[in-house]
Image (cartoon, rainbow, N blue to C red):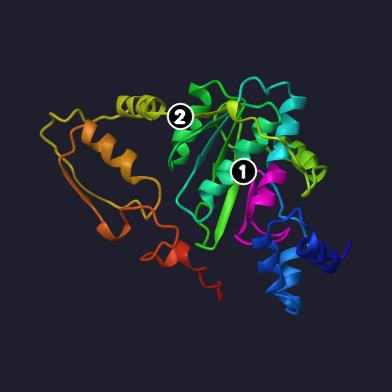
């Protein structure tokens, strides 16, 4: 189908929510915007999905996340890894909790246990959780350094590493064969909300790597900014554990905020290189 036909389908099919259809009908007549949203499917690669939040096949929304999760589920089932489960984490960006929930519900509808963090977490903790829990894969809902209007969906392998190009191609094939109209019946018994034990185990492993024991004559003074992301809680906790007493956290950037209000990048797209 042409992108115009796909657009009309999303505007009229009751499978999509009223909010989705209303948003898309609001751009009726804006051919440039319609084309940008529907001229292709959001591409999946070694860095997973990455795109502007909004409705359309070339946007990050619950439907593209659902389709990607169905493709990942089909890949996991083919590899006979569904019994191991998938750990899912998310960051401070807009729609991250919703995308996390959508991924978990889709996976458990396919008989795959989802280990979900109850609040935002840094990516290294997700990598640790995959190995600590013996999962087949991990998902992080994040757009990394991209502007604030973006979000993303990254897949990690059972070693807690970003997937290989070979795995990305295999997952892409499964995603391309999945439908935006896929309906599933979630099995909430397969969703396990993690408590603080995983985080504490992660911090304990990080603490073992410290060269500063808190008793040395050199006591570092540290200024730290989480950049409105996921780092405030784990970083300040680990610094406290190793004995850092002189810590200043930049107050304007301390707490999670998907708008990144004081940070020009990633809040805005960087200027193009004029060289």
189 within the magenta span: no
The magenta segment is 46-68
Tell me residue 38's x, y (percent): 76, 64
> Is residue 105 placed above or below 76 in the rendered structure?
below
Which residue is tagged 2?
Answer: 194
- The quadrant in which residue 149 appears is bottom right
> Is residue 92 placed above or below 147 in the rendered structure?
above
Q: Determine the residue located farthest toward the bottom in the rendered image.
A: 29
Q: In which quadrant of the rendered image does the C terminus lie?
A: bottom right
Tell me residue 191's x, y (percent): 56, 29
- The quadrant in which residue 124 appears is top left
- Helix, strand or loop under label 1: helix
- Helix, strand or loop under label 2: loop
56 within the magenta span: yes
Q: Residue at x 72, y 52 (%)?
A: 43
Q: In which quadrant of the rendered image does the N terminus lie?
A: bottom right
Tell me residue 228's x, y (percent): 37, 55
């Amino acid at each position: 189908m042409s992108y115009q036909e796909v657009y009309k389908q999303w505007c009229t099919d009751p499978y999509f929510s009223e909010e989705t259809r209303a948003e898309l009908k609001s751009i009726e007549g804006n051919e440039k915007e319609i084309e940008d949203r529907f001229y292709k499917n959001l591409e999946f690669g070694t860095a997973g999905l990455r795109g502007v939040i909004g409705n359309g096949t070339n946007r990050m929304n619950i439907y593209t996340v659902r389709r990607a999760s169905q493709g990942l589920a089909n890949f996991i089932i083919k590899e006979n890894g569904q019994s191991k489960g998938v750990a899912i984490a998310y960051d401070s960006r807009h729609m991250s909790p919703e995308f996390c929930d959508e991924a978990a519900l889709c996976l458990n509808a396919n008989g795959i246990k989802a280990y979900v963090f109850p609040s935002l977490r840094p990516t290294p903790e997700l990598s640790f959780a995959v190995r600590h829990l013996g999962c087949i894969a991990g998902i992080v809902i994040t757009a990394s350094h991209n502007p604030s209007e973006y979000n993303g969906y990254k897949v990690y392998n059972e070693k807690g590493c970003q997937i290989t190009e070979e795995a990305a191609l295999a997952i892409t094939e499964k995603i391309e064969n999945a439908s935006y109209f896929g309906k599933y019946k979630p099995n909430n018994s397969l969703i396990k909300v993690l408590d603080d034990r995983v985080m504490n185990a992660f911090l304990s492993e990080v603490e073992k790597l410290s060269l500063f024991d808190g008793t040395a004559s050199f006591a570092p003074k540290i200024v730290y900014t989480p950049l409105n992301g996921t780092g405030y809680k784990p970083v300040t906790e680990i610094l406290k554990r190793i004995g850092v007493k002189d810590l200043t956290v930049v107050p304007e950037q301390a707490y999670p905020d998907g708008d990144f209000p004081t940070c020009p990048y990633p809040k805005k797209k960087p200027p193009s290189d004029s060289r």
